Image: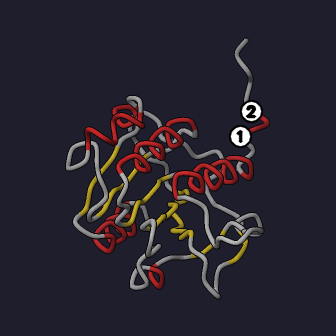
Amino acid sequence: IVVLLDNVRSAFNVGSIFRSADACGCSLVITTGITPSPHGSGREKLAKSALNADRIVPSKHFANTKEAIEFLRREHPGFELVGMETTDKSKCYTDETYPGAGCYTEGGIMPNNGVVLVLGNEVTGVDTEVMPLLDKIVEIPMFGKKNSLNIAACAPVMMYEVLRQWGAMENYKKIE
């Protein structure tokens, strides 16, 4: 799993996503544009909520999301790009399947296939110019008055759904 953060504003949200990325064994977190990054602006606040996960999970920063997508298409063509956004074309996240089962980063080498979860800005969401570049757009159904979850809450929901589909839960052994 790769997480791509499209102009996310809050360093605290980004730090929380790094913690979830570590918990789920993500291969990479990509930050773009104004998104705080471990080696750029906002790193102090990010580090407070990441609790060192920003030092564990590899990361890259790009000036914009289109550059990040070009990098992924070129360097990791077997990865499917999945945007999380509420639109007329979105499908329920549990109704979709995600490639990459059994494929994990080993020795710093990313696998040949997998999924990139694209999460957008807390207010404006995934950039409308980015959405046509994605392979799928999914959403988490909302049953209350609000139409979305906080990005730091929605990221782990999606990560764990991917892991569930990959059969990771069957291989999990609780350490006692």
Asked if the residue at tag 1 contacts the one at tag 2, i.e. Cβ–Cβ closer than 8 Å, the answer is yes
Q: Position of residue 110 (x, y in %)?
A: 44, 47
Name the residue beneath numbered marker 2.
171
Cα separation, mark 2 vs mark 1, equals 5 Å
Q: Residue furthest front?
A: 145
Q: Position of residue 174 (x, y in %)?
A: 73, 21
Query: Residue 67, labelled with which disc?
Result: none
Label 2 environment density (alpha carbons within 10 Å; few <14, some 14–19, many ≥20): few
The reply, left or right, for residue 102 in relation to residue 172 is left
Label 1 environment density (alpha carbons within 10 Å; few <14, some 14–19, many ≥20): some
**Nearer to us in this view, 64 or 171:** 64
- Residue at the (45%, 65%) spot, across then down: 122
Name the residue beneath numbered marker 1.
168
- Residue at the (54%, 67%) spot, across then down: 80
The reply, left or right, for residue 34 in relation to residue 117 is left
- Residue at the (74%, 24%) spot, across then down: 173
Q: Position of residue 70 (x, y in %)?
A: 33, 71
Amino acid bearing label 1: Ala
The reply, left or right, for residue 7 in relation to residue 99 is left
**Above or below 115: residue 120:** below
Q: Position of residue 154 (x, y in %)?
A: 60, 57
The reply, left or right, for residue 51 in relation to residue 115 is left
Regarding mark 2 in the picture, which secondary structure is present there? helix
Amino acid bearing label 2: Asn
Instruction: Identify the image's colour scheme: rainbow, by chain, secondary structure or one colour.
Output: secondary structure
Q: Residue furthest bottom?
A: 88
Regarding mark 1 in the picture, which secondary structure is present there? helix
Q: Quadrant of the C terminus?
A: top right
Q: Hey, which quadrant is residue 71 in on the image?
A: bottom left
Q: Hey, which quadrant is residue 44 in on the image?
A: top left
- Residue at the (47%, 81%) spot, across then down: 131
**Nearer to us in this view, 55 or 1:** 55
